[in-house]
Image (cartoon, rainbow, N blue to C red):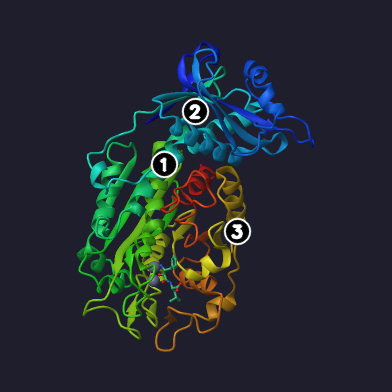
Amino acid sequence: MTFNLLNKDINTLTCPALVVFAKASSQKDKPAKVTHSELAKRLAGAVEEKTITGKHQEAVTFREIGFNGFRHVIVVGLGKENAIDHESVRQSMASAYEAIKALNVKEAAIHFDGVATGKKDAVEFARATAEGLTLTAYVFDELKSDKKDGKKSELNVHVVTKAAAGIKAAFNEGLVLGSVVNFSRRLGDMPGNLMTPTILADSAVEAAKGIAGLKVTVWDKARIKKEKMGGLLGVAQGSDQEPRFIIMEYKGAAAAKKPVVFVGKGLTFDCGGISIKPSAGMEEMKYDMCGGANVIGTLLAIAKLKLKVNAVGLVASTENLVNGSATKPGDVHTARNGKTFEVNNTDAEGRLILADALSYATELEPQMICDAATLTGAMVVALGNTHTGYFTRNSALKNKIEKAAGESGEWVWQMPLTDFHVKDMKGTYADLSNISAGKGAGSATAAAFLEQFVGEGIPWAHFDIAGTGWAVGNRLPYAPKKGASGAMIRTFVEIAKQYK
Ligand code: BES
Ligand code: ZN
Ligand code: ZN
């Protein structure tokens, strides 16, 4: 599978399949406009008959139409012409990709000119096109016996435009982002037995090989102990698998420049520990490392795009299981920053491993910290799988996050974090309790717990991706029906760009 930008006149091309687009009129009862002028004439009847309406994501395939050098023509709807933005383009490209796949051809051309109306749009849309195509092409079938030998699809898709100059870089950026998101999705989709903390760490090391300016260090259990990471160790003691602490450092700016730090929850399987989860759906807890996987993807993307920023990615990784040494309800552990906590529910383990990671992040005196974690079921209740809820008390960082999400197309929603939530997390026997003394607001009280490990004055935001980390395919046509989504990688990269 390859996607490339071709700087050519589309009419000079010979290819089995051609994709053009149709825009629905913003005025009622006006016909759709097909973006290729010659085809617009040829398909005027289909437009008249409303076979082609331009409706967002509509795909109408004209098999064996024999137009110029093309056997088949696909017309993909972009939606109402005044409502087209980069996200609708990203989604329309999913329809284009699926329609091409259905034709079973080895090569296809996508007519890009005319999708955008302005120069700025063209740049944004070129990136969205590359992202939409790459993200839709993701499949996770390597564990099926007939796919084991890694049979690759031979499809080559050319995105064809007459004006490649300004948009080439944007298209390439889209390809990089799409491919790192797919890399992280694969980490998430791998089952717990094949994606242990050790394998997760090795995957980060392997992926970073050969990328300029990117260094990966992995701490094993002995080192984690030496580094006084009592939260991570406390969770890991219930498992036969060794924990790992992954440090990814990228230097894209002067050495003296403070880094931006991304922190991820890398729970490769969460059964709940002694406070065990119900059996139904427990297999989904292999996704509990998606925050970590997506932080790894974020650092890979920042380095591949050569952003002029110093960035660090920290992933605390362990299983949460139940052997004879597992942490018991009531046990008290000490985090890296010296604070103690009672574990009153062993299933609230993400915050314990993040406590150490955030303490370590604080020691780096960063410009800001953003963490991503599948932290609470309450987040799924609150926002489902549409928006990632984020928590921050820093208004400048909030503005950066909103701007970044606007650029990436990922939906985020600010959630409250107040001193009341902090009060609910006070411990009886230790400094803190890992569950709230109050009722409700489970995501906010979890955020309040995390806040105790972030240094005073450091801009920090916590992203709870419990609802958006996987299974968003019902909403996003470029995401798998069931599977890891790679949520927040693209937004985190946009945040990092603002610290150049
Ligand atoms: N990994 C879960 C959160 C989760 C739940 C993610 C559903 C995705 C889907 C987390 O470790 C957990 O179990 N949290 C508990 C906390 C509670 C015990 C305070 C929860 O949300 O129930
Ligand atoms: Zn849990
Ligand atoms: Zn968990």
Residue 364 in the image: x percent, y percent?
A: 40, 57
Asked whether 443 or 303 is in front, the reply is 443
Q: Is residue 43 visible?
A: yes
Which disc, if any, is residue 21?
none
Q: Whole-Å distance between the Cαs marked 1 and 2? A: 14 Å
* Between marks 3 and 2 in the image, the one whose residue lies nearer the viewer: 3
Which residue type does callout 3 highlight?
Trp
Residue shown at 48% from the left, 72% from the top:
446
The earlier-in-sequence mark between 3 and 2 is 2
Residue shown at 24% from the left, 69% from the top:
225
Determine which residue is flagged by label 3.
413
In this rendering, the count of numbered labels is 3
Residue shown at 51% from the left, 71% from the top:
378
The earlier-in-sequence mark between 1 and 3 is 1
**Residue extending furthest toward the top:** 12
Which residue type does callout 2 highlight?
Ala
Which disc, if any, is residue 301?
1
Residue 90 in the image: x percent, y percent?
A: 55, 38
Which residue type does callout 1 highlight?
Ala
> How many residues crowd mark 2 within 10 Å: few (<14), some (14–19), many (20+)?
some
Q: In terms of secondary structure, where does tag 3 sit?
A: strand
Q: In terms of secondary structure, where does tag 1 sit?
A: helix
Against 37, residue 497 (above or below) is below
Q: Whole-Å distance between the Cαs marked 3 and 2? A: 30 Å
Determine which residue is flagged by label 2.
169
